[in-house]
Amino acid sequence: MAEALLSFSSPHSRASLATATDIGFELGWDHARYGLTPPAEHLIAGNPLRDGWEAGRAAFGRRTRESNANARRWLTLRLTAWLHGRHFEPLTVTPNFLGQIDTAACPITREALTTTRGPAHEAVVARVCEDAGYAAGNLAMLSARAASAKTALDFEEAVARAEQAQRNEPGHANRAHADLTAPQWARLAVMLSFVTPLPHARAAALPLLVLPPNRLRVLNPIQGLQTLVTLLLAKSGWSQRLPKLEALMPHAAARRELRAFFMVYMPRVIAGGRPDDHAAWRRALEDAWRHPLVQSHWKRFALKLDEPTCDAVLQRAIEAGLMTQRVQVHTEEQATEGWSLETRGFAERRAVARRRQRAAAPQAAAMPALQPRQLALPMDL
């Protein structure tokens, strides 16, 4: 999906984009706050970013903040959102937040994020749900190659790409569609599923080929439980935690299926021994989900539960301390707060226009909104 860039080349444009002008001024002001110069193309006369930058320089002088990597990335992200008319949630997406989602390797390609191997391997902060804005819970650090492949795709489209790549060269990591391999496309599809409310049976059938990146929201309760179950093996003491998790199940059939799942999952996780490296151990937890027997046993267990039961089990598991990482729980309203779903992630100026259209034509059907769930992700995977 192409997105038009903002233009300030005519008085008509400036008059019609008053909100965007205010955002541009604030962005220029914050460049000055950190002692940074905006990109040259925004320093032409009449650009609100230049106006804000010059006003900020006059106000701050030499009393600027440290412009570390997170601050520079934050300003770049805001500039990208502004140019494409996308909503940016300033209360939750901060330089500190971007530091929390930073990672050494791309969760999709599993390649190191570095500038020494070319632009494709550089780190990019990407919106996971394309129909949402730049907000906490919808951002992940990916390689530029993975972020480019993801652009404008939803969950089902990514699934189709993974299946097509697999058919092209069965059993091989062939490259197709923006240079992603079939396993990489499959991991991308699973990541997109986290922020895509799905029917319980559909979500229950998905293998956890990639663990949720730090601070990404998990909107489907069964995938939240799937993450919890997987992470039971992430640290020592899992054999003591498993019986406690079984005790939270609503009936004997679910307890039996959960135990059967672990009996096929655990041996495949430790088949190559437990790696000392954290990243390698994470990959082992993910790759064990590729086995068909693991997937079939998980589906049998997951279908013994429904969404409300998954929510209840998750809440009790967190209260019992069974999560090996810190988690943050949200209400349904909080889960996608600031995502700007009503405008499919575009800035508020579009929301105002849409509200006016609805007022003029109240009989028009409202745009469907995502229905959020309450689980958010572990903080320190």
Image (tube, helix red, strand yellow):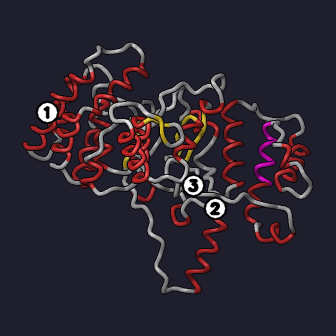
Q: Where is residue 137 in the image (x, y as percent from the top left)?
A: 49, 46
> Is 107 or 334 nearer to us in this picture?
107
Q: Could you tell me which quadrant the C terminus lies in?
A: top left
Disc 1 target residue:
259
- The secondary element bearing badge 1 is classed as helix
The answer for how far apart the CA atoms under marks 2 and 3 are is 8 Å
Q: Where is residue 27 in the image (x, y as percent from the top left)?
A: 76, 49
Instruction: Please give the label number shown on residue 347.
Output: 2
Q: Give me the residue at 90% from left, 38% from top.
A: 61
Amino acid carrying label 2: it is Ala
Q: Mark 1 or 3 closer to N-term?
A: 3
Q: Is residue 328 above or below residue 236?
A: below
Q: Could you tell me which quadrant the N terminus lies in?
A: bottom right
- The secondary element bearing badge 3 is classed as loop
Considering every residue shown, the one lying at the far left of the view is 252
- Decide whether residue 32 is among the magenta residues: yes
Mark 2 and mark 1 in contact? Answer it, CB < 8 Å. no
Mark 2 and mark 3 in contact? Answer it, CB < 8 Å. yes
Disc 3 target residue:
133
Q: Give me the residue at 29% from left, 57% from top.
A: 199
Q: Give the range drawn in magenta.
A: 25-34
Q: Is residue 109 above or below residue 160?
A: above
The answer for how far apart the CA atoms under marks 1 and 3 are is 40 Å
Q: Give me the residue at 74% from left, 61% from top.
A: 20
Amino acid carrying label 1: it is Arg
> Is 251 or 82 nearer to us in this picture?
82
